[in-house]
Amino acid sequence: MRLRTIGLTLALCVVAVAATFASDPNLGTWKLNEAKSKIAAGIGKNDTVVYEAMSDSVKVSIDGTGADGKALHTEWTGKFDGKEYAVTGDPTSDMRSYTRVDDNTLAFAAQKAGKPTLSGRIVVSADGKTRTVTTDSKDEKGVKLTNTGVYDKQ
C-alpha cells in the first residue's frame, strides 16, 4: 500500500510539472523572420531559438551569428523566476535572468562579470505563432542600441 501511495504521488508531481510547461507559449523552436525584424548594424543575431522543459527548469539554446560574423551557440538553463543563471557560449554575457510578466510575456536581463549588458522583453502572440523580442544594449562606444527580432514558431 505504501509503495502504491509513493508511486501515485510521484505520478501526480510529474503530471503537475508537465501541465505547467505544456501551457507555456515560449516552449518550442523559433526561427528569425529577418523581413519583419529590425536588427541594428554590427549586432549579432539569433537565427534559431529553442525553449525546452527540463524537469522544473527551462533550457534555452540559441544558434546564430555574433557581431564578428562568426557562428554562435549559447545555452542557458534556469527558471523564469528573476534569478540569474549561468550562460555558456555567449561572448557578451555570463549570467542571464528571465522574469514572467504575464502568460505571454517575459522580461530578461544579461550581464558579464557583474555588469549589465542587455535587457529586453519577449512577447508571444495570442495565437502562439510569433514571438517578438525587443532588446536594449550598448555598443563598445556606449551608444544605445535597440533591436526587434520577430520569430516564427516551427
Image (cartoon, helix red, strand yellow):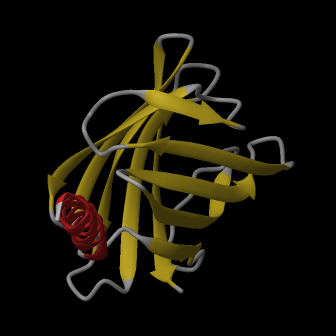
Q: Give 58 or 132, whichever is nearer the viewer.
A: 58
Lateral position of residue 28 relative to residue 134, left or right: right
Residue 113, position as x, y percentages in the image: 56, 11
Residue 91, position as x, y percentages in the image: 71, 30
- Tell me if I can see residue 144 in this picture: no
Q: Give 99 or 143, whichever is nearer the viewer.
A: 99
Point 51% across, 69% down: residue: 37
Is residue 134 placed above or below 144 in the rendered structure? below
- The residue lying furthest to the front in this view is 1
Where's the N terminus, which quadrant? Answer: bottom left
Q: Give 121 or 60, whichever is nearer the viewer.
A: 60
- The residue lying furthest to the left in this view is 102
Residue 124, position as x, y percentages in the image: 30, 71
Point 20% across, 68% down: residue: 8
The answer to which quarter of the image holds residue 84 is top left
- Tell me if I can see residue 147 in this picture: yes
Point 59% across, 25% down: residue: 94
- The residue lying furthest to the right in this view is 70
Where's the C terminus, which quadrant? Answer: bottom right
Lateral position of residue 66 relative to residue 71, left or right: left
Point 30% across, 65% down: residue: 14
Is residue 32 placed above or below 147 in the rendered structure? below
The answer to which quarter of the image holds residue 33 is bottom right
Is residue 24 placed above or below 54 in the rendered structure? below
